[in-house]
Amino acid sequence: MWYHTGIKRSIPVMPATPHLPAGVRYLVGVDGGGTGTRARVLQVASTVGAPALLLGQGEAGPSALGQGLEQAWRHVQLAIARAFDVAGVPEPAPSELALGLGLAGAHAPSRREAFIAGAPTFGLLRVDTDGGAALRGAHAGAPGAVVASGTGSVGEALRRDGRRLTVGGWGFGIGDEGSGGWLGLEAMRLAQRAIDGRASAGALARAVWSATAGERNALVDWCARAGQNGYARLAPLVFEHAEADACARRLLEQAAVELEALAHALDPAADLPVVLTGSIAQRLEPWLSPALRRRCVAPQGDPIDGALRLLCGNALPPA
């Protein structure tokens, strides 16, 4: 498990420490996805307008809402506790925290509302999607687009006329094309066809067999319990075997096509700067077209920065 250093430093994550409810002493930003959860804790400055002080960062397991609301809260709270532990600060009461969350699966209104209803009594609580947090962090609240692909995939944009747009992100098994979960699922389908003799047993199929015990009954059992996170863990095998296996190469080519489609739907005029975020999007960058790669820029901040911006009034329009 990796933890952020506990060294304290001032960071310009937000324009200034915002006006907060009485009793709030800490700002917490959380980036929660299908593979893991990261929480960053800042101490509120004693003077309004002064920068907050970074205390620490912690990690925990997945908090995508589609994997269960109870699990999501458990891992969010564990990541926060670990961040305070890294900082060497006793974990305060929830009422002392202003919490901004960017969570996978928060695009479903009923699921988001149920998640919020199960929250402890925080001093302030604001929730957006993981894509919205990534967008806000990547462009510091300015117009731009984000193509995010990790465990899942989604495209987000803030257009120059102030409109916010979300494309993709429909969820594992239905959408999330070009994501780790999607790549892993496609790799498993190939492995199943190969074990049946319906496809050749190339390097990728054999690697999937090796990772999942390699015979029919074992594959059936593995698939029954894998879920989105389990399939996403197979995605690195596709990259590892792309040079030797034409099927793996075709999967990466198709994944790149899917991310290109997200970018085009977000901004058909190709006017906005684009940030690629998430481990799969970044690994797929060499497979993207030169035209899209020329528009790609370095992010100004990460999704946790975007979650923190939820707390300072730098909120984007609803998707």
Image (cartoon, rainbow, N blue to C red):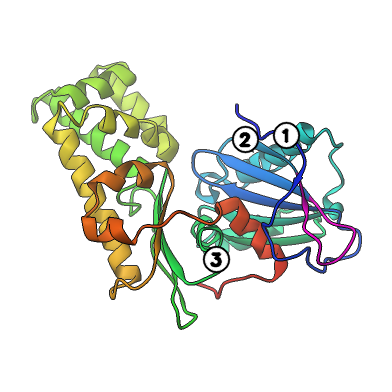
Question: Magenta region's main secondary structure?
Answer: loop
Which residue is at a point 60% across and 26% down the rendered structure image?
Answer: 1
Amino acid residing under circle 1: Arg
10 Å neighbourhood of mark 1: few (<14), some, or many (≥20)? many
Q: CA distance from mark 3 to mark 2?
A: 25 Å
Amino acid residing under circle 3: Pro
Q: Secondary structure at mark 3?
A: helix
| Residue toward you, 290 or 268 | 290
- Looking at the image, is mark 3 or mark 2 earlier in the sequence? 2
| Residue toward you, 191 or 168 | 168
Identify the residue at the far bottom of this view. Answer: 161
Mark 2 and 1 residues: CB-CB less than 8 Å, in contact? yes
The residue indicated by pointer 3 is: 109
The answer to whether 296 is drawn above or below residue 242 in the figure is below
Q: Is residue 70 visible?
A: no
Q: Secondary structure at mark 2?
A: strand
Which residue is at a point 73% across and 55% down the rendered structure image?
Answer: 99
| Residue toward you, 159 or 247 | 159
The residue indicated by pointer 2 is: 60
Marking on residue 82 = 1
Residue 213, position as x, y percentages in the image: 31, 16
Asked whether residue 58 is drawn in magenta, I would say no
Q: Which residues are magenta?
A: 43-54
Mark 3 and 2 residues: CB-CB less than 8 Å, in contact? no
